[in-house]
Image (cartoon, rainbow, N blue to C red):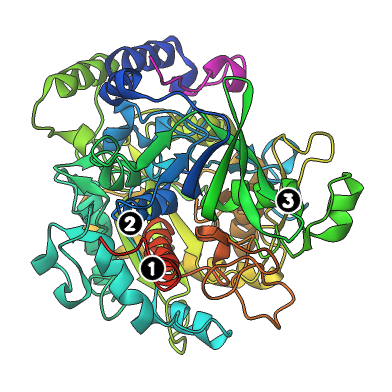
Amino acid sequence: MIWQPLNLTEVCPPCTPVSACSNFGFVYLSLLVQLFGGSAEQKKQEKCARDPVDGAEYDFIVVGAGAAGSVITNRLTENPHWKVLLLEAGGEEPDVTRVPSFFTVLTSSSLDWKYSSEPNGKSCLAFPEGRCGWPRGKGMGGSTAINAMAYVRGNKVDYDEWERMGNKGWSYDDCLPYFMKSERNLNKYSVDSAFHGVRGEQAVSWLLSEDDPSTMMIDAFNTVGIPFRDFNGAEQVGAMQAQTFSVDSERVSAYSAFIHHIRHTRPNCDVKPHCEVTKILIDDTKTARGVEYIKDGKKYTAYAKKEVITCAGVVNTAKLLMLSGIGPKEHLESLNIPVVQDLAVGENLQDHVSFNGMIVALSNETAPTVSEDQMLSDIKEYAEMKIKKGPLAGLGPIMSCSFIKSEPHLVAPDLQCQAVPVLRWEEFIQDPITHEKAAIMPTAYYNALVPRIMNVVPKSRGKMFLNKNDPNGPPEIHANYLGDERDIEPLMRGVRFLLSLEDTEAFKSRGAYFVREKMPHCKEHEWGTDEYFLCLIRQYTSTTHHQCGGCKMGPSWDKKAVVDSELRVYGVARLRVIDASIIPVVMRGNTAAPTMMIAEKGVDSVIKYWQNTTDDYCF
């Protein structure tokens, strides 16, 4: 087995009412490991894998096999004259990632870096030490192997703002062709077809399983004036079941879409898992020449004749640059790291902030609940299906998504709303912290949902630093949620919007209602008051997993910029950052699809540069 789930003994306190911490939780995880913990891909790679060769030379070295690195490696290896090394710290993608309803069990497992944020005294207050979890994917596919699979692009004004900030060529009209290039939309003529592609590698489709509470949420949104609309099209204000990175209701990660089929058919493509890059090799002329990486405890070097491209994600790209001497001078010197280039690496960290604690209970007739025995039986039956269907082939209410304006004068939405299922709300409200830390149950079965309002235009900015006790260890992530008080106002307006859903026929006809019992850390406030909901926001703050920034894209006069508009690191030749780190201002939506767009656009700049520089382009 290559997949190790969350260790329940580490997160479950004695006497908690949370079902995941009962004997059933251990039985459930054991069954998942038995049925889905292995990987057909792993068996194949064990036969075909090539051992690392110390000092090997390539044209390009790509660090990280996530949303960006997978796209970039595919595009570069289209040229048979270019030899490309793709290094990934994690392992192969296990079968458990393919099942939509199991996505919650992937975080805090062996597929997750298990990062957490530093306390700031304003958010995450109910959690131990005031720290919120920051899951990030570790393995082939990166975070696209563990996320909820939503295909959401953001708003036109986001990308136009990037260009107004001095990033030439990054307007929405410039970016749209790169969104469409990757996309193979299997429902093109059911969405705003002029804005979607069908010839790319990345499958995009609706999940085939949609339960009644999911329909209820969309009906309720429509009733209060949010139109049914493809929010990836011409207008974003709207509500619908979000499309996903999937085919036939199975996850298709970036690795599966862009690397799997070329890994052993293109001899110039060398993919190496379990190889963690620890340093970029930079010579005295400030030119990137290669990398150092660790595999099975042994250090190797690899050299790049053309470029090193870091795609290690928001946390690990910034960490790698700083370990290599690229970052804030004062911080690096405090750790005795020789400074190669003084840049604002680790700054401009952003995420959409949300919170938990508003609970919509479902009637017995509406709630998709089953007994524990039936759940295990459904899982066994699903494993045997050749064509996957049934509740496990869906995500419960999670893809019921809307984008709204909390004030009518806004030029674009400032709030996104989705909902997460709760197996038994009676358990959740007694011990919400353990419930979140042990959120392992399938999303298909629940008797309540927690609608989550997300502020998609946050003013707060965070920073990241290397670990002062162990620079190679988990970095210090100062997410700084709610650091800017202005981030609370849209959330509070969003709360009132959510409460209005209770009066819709969609809710009433199904017996759905807001639970008015108080959450443990907010009992001193009256339910329904601004004070109560403000307490929820500060106590039960949550990431939306839309982290970005840390290596800001900007013009040369921007003192916080790390890369230029072609994603080249300032002051270091032949080194680029191409991933969500470069995002100057977070877009209104999820980040996986935009990261693929950034990769398509970034690698196009790479190809065009070397096309005009070398003789080995034509093929």
- Element carrying mark 1: helix
Relative side of 370 to 50, left or right: left
- Marks 2,3: beta carbons within 8 A: no
- Residue 164 vertical position relative to residue 44 in the rendered view, above or below: below
Residue lying at 24% horizontally and 75% vertically, measured from the top left: 227
Relative side of 304 to 521, left or right: left
Let me know if residue 446 is in the magenta part. Answer: no
Say what amino acid the circle numbered 3 marks: Met
CA gap, disc 2 and disc 3: 28 Å
Front of the two marks 1 and 3: 1
User: Badge 2: few (under 14), some or many (20 or more) residues near its Cα, within 10 Å?
Assistant: some
- Residue 63 vertical position relative to residue 608 in the rendered view, above or below: above
Range of the magenta residues? 1-19
- Marks 2,1: beta carbons within 8 A: yes
Let me know if residue 13 is in the magenta part. Answer: yes
User: Badge 1: few (under 14), some or many (20 or more) residues near its Cα, within 10 Å?
Assistant: some
Residue 195 vs residue 23, the one in the foreground: 195
Q: Earlier in the sequence, mark 2 or mark 1?
A: 2
Q: Which residue is mark 2?
A: 75
Q: Which residue is mark 3?
A: 322
Q: Which residue is mark 1?
A: 604
- Element carrying mark 3: helix
User: Badge 3: few (under 14), some or many (20 or more) residues near its Cα, within 10 Å?
Assistant: many
Front of the two marks 2 and 3: 2
Say what amino acid the circle numbered 1 marks: Asp
Report whether residue 438 is seen. Answer: yes
Say what amino acid the circle numbered 2 marks: Arg
